[in-house]
Amino acid sequence: MRYLKKPFWLVLLLLVTTVAVVVTSVFVKQHGESVIYSIRVDNSLTANQDAKTSKGNVKTTRGKDTQTENSTTPLRPPIPASLQVSGEQLFAHVQRLNFTRHTPAERSRTRAYITTELKKLGWKPQLEKFEDGVNVFAERPGTDKNAGAILVGAHYDTVYISPGADDNASGVAVMLEIARLLGSRPTPKTLQLAFFDKEEAGLLGSKAFVTNKKHLENLQGVIVLDMVGYACHTSGCQKYPTGLPVTPPSDQGDFLAVVGDTEHLPLLHAFQNSQKLPPISFNKESTKGTIESMPPVLTLPIPLKGLLTPDTLRSDHAPFWYQGVGAVLVTDTANLRTPHYHQPSDVPATLDRKFFTGAAQVVVNTTSVLLENSDALGSPPSTSSESS
Ligand SMILES: [Zn+2]
C-alpha cells in the first residue's frame, strides 16, 4: 500500500469537505434524501443465521450442500470443500517471504520464489519487464472463449525498511493459495494472476501492466489484494478516512474492506454475496488450518474514480479504474488499522491468523463464483430512460 503525502492530503481534505457539503445540499434539495454512497456490511455468521431463518427465504443445510432460494436471490452453487484455504500454506508463504523486498536482488529473489511456487502448481509464469521493474504474469484459460477473464493481482515489493508481512506478503500468499485451489479447476472464465513490482514506488508495476492493451482485452474484473492479514481487537483501534461516510461494522478492526468504483458494482456485489454463500463442507478430521469464520466485509462504492477520496487510490487497482476496467481493492485498511505499516515490525508474528485465513477464504469464494459465471460483469442496464 502506498503512503499518501500529508500536504496533498490536507488540501484535498478541504476540497472534499467543501464539495461534499455542496453536493449533499444540492442532492437533498433535488431528491429530498441524501444518498451519496450506499455502504453495506454483511457478517458471514449472521448472514448464515439469517439464511436459516425466514429472512430472504433462503434455506441452507450445513454439510449437505443443499439450498432452496426464492426468485429474488440468484441461485448459487455451494462452495465445494476442495476450495478450502489452508492457513498453514498461507503462513508458510509469508514466512518464506520474511525479508525486505526492495533492492533489485531482493525483488529478483522474490520473483524466483513466486515463479517456483507457480510452476510446482502447474502454472507457466511469464516475466514481464518494464522500465523500472518486472511483473510476474500467469494465466489459466477458461472453457468459454466469450466469457472473458478475471485478474487477481498483488504487489510483491516492499519499502526499504520493512519485511512487509502484511504489506504485501499477505496478498502474495493469498494469490498462491488461489493458484493452488483454482489452478486446475475448469471454469468458463479465464483466471489471470499478476504479481506487481514497484507498487511502493508509485504503482509502477500495475501502471506498466495496463499500458499493454492485450492485458485489458476481455478483462471482466480485477481483484487487487493489498494487506489482508492484520486485525485489531480493541475498541477504537480502527480509524476511518475523513470524507467517507462509513458506518463501521464494529468499533474494532476485524473486518475486510473492499473498495470498488461505482461504475462496476457487480464486483462489489460479488463480495457482498460471498458472505451469503452456503458454507463449505469442512473436513471435520482436519482441525489445523480450518476456517472458523470469515470476517465481515465492508464494501465501499467509490464515485468519480476516487477523485474526492484520494485515500482510496493508494494501490494497484487505481490504474485499472483509469482504464475503465472494473477493479476492487481488498484490504485490512493499512495504516488506518495497523501500527506496523511500513515499519520493520511488519513481520509474520504480528499477523492475525484467524482473520488472515478467513479473509483469504472470502477472496477464494468470490473469485470462484466470478469465474463460474460465464456472463459479462457489466453494471445492470440503467432504467432511468424508462422512468423519464
Ligand atoms: Zn505499502
Image (cartoon, rainbow, N blue to C red):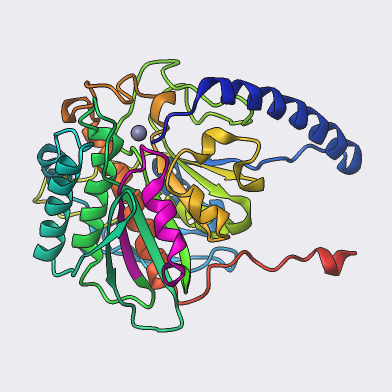
Q: Magenta span has 209?
A: yes
The picture places residue 218, in percent across and down from the top left corner, at: 47, 74
The picture places residue 134, in percent across and down from the top left corner, at: 27, 54
**Image height of 124 relative to 267, above or below:** below
**Image height of 242 relative to 78, above or below:** above
Question: Of residues 362 and 208, which is closer to you in this image?
Answer: 208
**Image height of 2 relative to 366, above or below:** above
Quadrant where ligand 1 appears: top left
Q: Is residue 253 visible?
A: no
Choose top left, top right, bottom left or bottom right for residue 235: top left
Q: Quadrant of the C terminus?
A: bottom right
Chain part drawn in magenta: 191-215
Side of 150 where 166 appears, left or right: left
Extreme top residue here? 235
Q: Quadrant of the N terminus?
A: top left
Choose top left, top right, bottom left or bottom right for residue 96: top left
